[in-house]
């Protein structure tokens, strides 16, 4: 025994032994923090989708709203529930992370009218896979939430100025749906563009004298009753004026409208914005002005090297149009300021640097997703930025898509726009989605939804 005493008294190996013993709980604690952070981020994304679904289901432009208007009593509104389900799935699969878009999610939706008030409730639940906690035998964590929106009943006024910035550049001349795209490609089979392929874009070409170019694919689209993306946008914005007409106070909502320009330019500074209507509370006048918006014209194919979309210029210019910083919306003297930006998210302009994008053809032609810093300049002034992203659709026959966009930055177009938007004010609308309902829901959120349609949870 006496020979073992020195060994038993020796403490030099204790640190290694204690470290080994504590390693498992230390790793578990670190993993718990990481996995809980991932769970929180996933829940935030799914809550945004649920908010959009709850609002969209009962927005004035939705089929559910029309069904509600025809109801003579209380009860559930099944068509609105179907709309909410579709919108939730569309948002979680397009505007969210890969994890949120691929997980199996249980969704239950109820839309009901009672005593003049319509309420839409969206519940969701899923099991989020863990990463580090698998060491402790925990393979998943529950994620759930509830979003509730209502319409009708008592509400307070929110005074808001909306500055509509509508992308009307040639890429918005794509067919509104895949069927429209296919129809335009087929219709232009005998009039291939300068690149020698059938064109999926209804390029609107007008000679310098103002006379329509008879080779314009825009004329072909019109002759074949093909609906373009710009058509759907303008109709949805006109419907937005109908939504705003439900204001509870005079001049509660005022609107101004801008596009990226009526005609493209080949001379410096190349880019600007066009004021369609100055800030006004006359919604009827605004609706008529919106109806005059058209696709930007060019004089010929490859006009200005087809570099016709400058987000840098558009967002900087709209900031200069807004003379005051954003307020709370509590009174006419403290109005909220909102830039309501509708775009397909692809920048294509002549510039000296091309961060995150691709040079193409001309040495100074840059294709790139939007830089979120452009929106930060607005948000730093208290101005909300609401973004309605009309999904930029891949064109497999287009070499620009195949070589410059898809392999380099296509995956960043939507996420960059989402980062550009004020939190919770980003909607993505695919060709199969209801743009009018989505725009109405985004309008309600941007105006804090304190009048009429609003989030209550």
Image: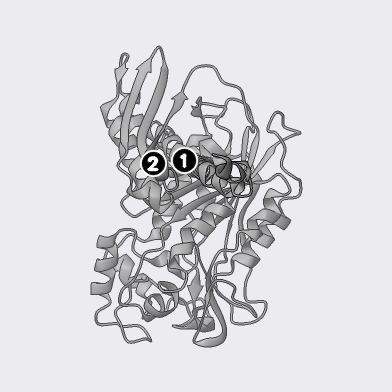
Using residue 323 as the reference point, say whether residue 31 is left or right of it: left
In front here: 273 or 141? 141
Label 1 packing within 10 angstroms: few (<14), some (14-19), many (20+): many
In front here: 171 or 143? 143
Q: Which residue is rendered at x = 58% and y = 25% of the image? A: 248
Query: Measured from the top left, where is residue 22 in percent x and y?
Result: 54, 42
Q: Quadrant of the N terminus?
A: top right
Residue sitting at the far top: 115
* In this view, 271 is above or below 117: below
**Helix or strand or loop: what does disc 2 sit on?**
strand
Using residue 337 as the reference point, say whether residue 116 is left or right of it: left
Q: Tell me if label 1 and label 2 are in contact, CB under 8 Å.
A: yes
In front here: 438 or 12? 12
C-alpha gap between disc 1 and disc 2: 7 Å
Say which mark, if any, is on residue 60: none
**Helix or strand or loop: what does disc 1 sit on?**
helix
- The residue indicated by pointer 2 is 128
Using residue 281 as the reference point, say whether residue 171 is left or right of it: left
Q: Which residue is rendered at x = 68% and y = 61% of the image? A: 317
Q: Is residue 63 visible?
A: no
Q: Is residue 112 visible?
A: yes
In front here: 284 or 75? 75
Label 2 packing within 10 angstroms: few (<14), some (14-19), many (20+): many
Q: Which residue is rendered at x = 48% and y = 62% of the image? A: 413
- The residue indicated by pointer 1 is 39
* In this view, 263 is above or below 96: below
Residue sitting at the far front: 2
Query: Measured from the top left, where is residue 313 in percent x and y?
Result: 65, 67
């Amino acid at each position: 025994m006496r020979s073992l005493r020195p060994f038993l008294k020796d403490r030099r190996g204790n640190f290694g032994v204690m470290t080994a013993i504590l390693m498992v709980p230390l790793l578990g604690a670190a993993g718990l923090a990481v996995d809980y952070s991932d769970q929180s981020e996933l829940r935030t994304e799914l809550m945004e989708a649920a908010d959009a679904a709850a609002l969209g289901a009962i927005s004035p432009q939705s089929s559910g709203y029309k069904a509600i208007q025809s109801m003579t009593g209380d009860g559930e509104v099944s068509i609105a529930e179907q709309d909410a389900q579709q919108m939730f799935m569309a948002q979680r699969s397009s505007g969210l992370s890969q994890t949120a878009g691929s997980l199996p999610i249980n969704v239950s939706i109820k839309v009901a009218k009672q005593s003049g008030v319509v309420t839409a409730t969206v519940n969701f639940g899923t099991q989020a896979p863990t990463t580090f906690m698998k060491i402790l035998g925990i393979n998943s964590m529950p994620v759930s939430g509830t979003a509730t929106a209502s319409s009708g009943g008592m509400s307070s006024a929110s005074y808001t100025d909306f500055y509509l910035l509508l992308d009307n550049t040639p890429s918005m001349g794509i067919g509104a749906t895949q069927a429209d795209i296919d129809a335009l490609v087929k219709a232009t089979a005998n009039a291939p563009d300068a690149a020698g392929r059938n064109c999926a874009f209804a390029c609107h070409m007008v000679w310098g004298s103002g006379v329509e170019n008879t080779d314009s694919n825009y004329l072909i689209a019109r002759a074949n009753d093909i609906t373009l993306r710009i058509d759907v946008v303008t109709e949805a914005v006109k419907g937005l004026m109908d939504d705003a007409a439900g204001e509870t106070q005079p001049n509660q909502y005022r609107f101004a409208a801008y596009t990226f320009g009526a005609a493209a330019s080949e001379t410096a500074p190349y880019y600007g914005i066009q004021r369609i209507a100055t800030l006004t509370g006359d919604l009827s006048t605004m609706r008529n002005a919106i109806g005059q918006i058209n696709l930007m014209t060019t004089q010929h194919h490859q006009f200005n090297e087809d570099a016709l979309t400058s987000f840098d210029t558009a967002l900087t210019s709209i900031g200069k149009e807004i003379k005051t910083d954003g307020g709370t919306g509590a009174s006419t003297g403290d109005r909220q300021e909102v830039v309501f930006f509708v775009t397909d998210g692809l920048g294509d302009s002549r510039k000296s640097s091309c961060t995150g994008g691709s040079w193409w053809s001309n040495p100074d032609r840059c294709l790139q997703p939007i830089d979120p810093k452009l929106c930060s300049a607005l948000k730093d002034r208290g101005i909300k930025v609401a973004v309605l992203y009309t999904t930029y659709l891949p064109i497999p026959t287009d070499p620009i898509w195949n070589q410059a966009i898809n392999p380099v930055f296509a995956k960043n177009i939507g996420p960059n726009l989402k980062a550009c938007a004020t939190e919770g004010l980003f909607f993505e609308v695919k060709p199969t989605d209801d743009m009018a309902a989505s725009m109405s829901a985004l309008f309600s959120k941007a105006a804090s939804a304190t009048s009429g349609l609003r989030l209550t949870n």
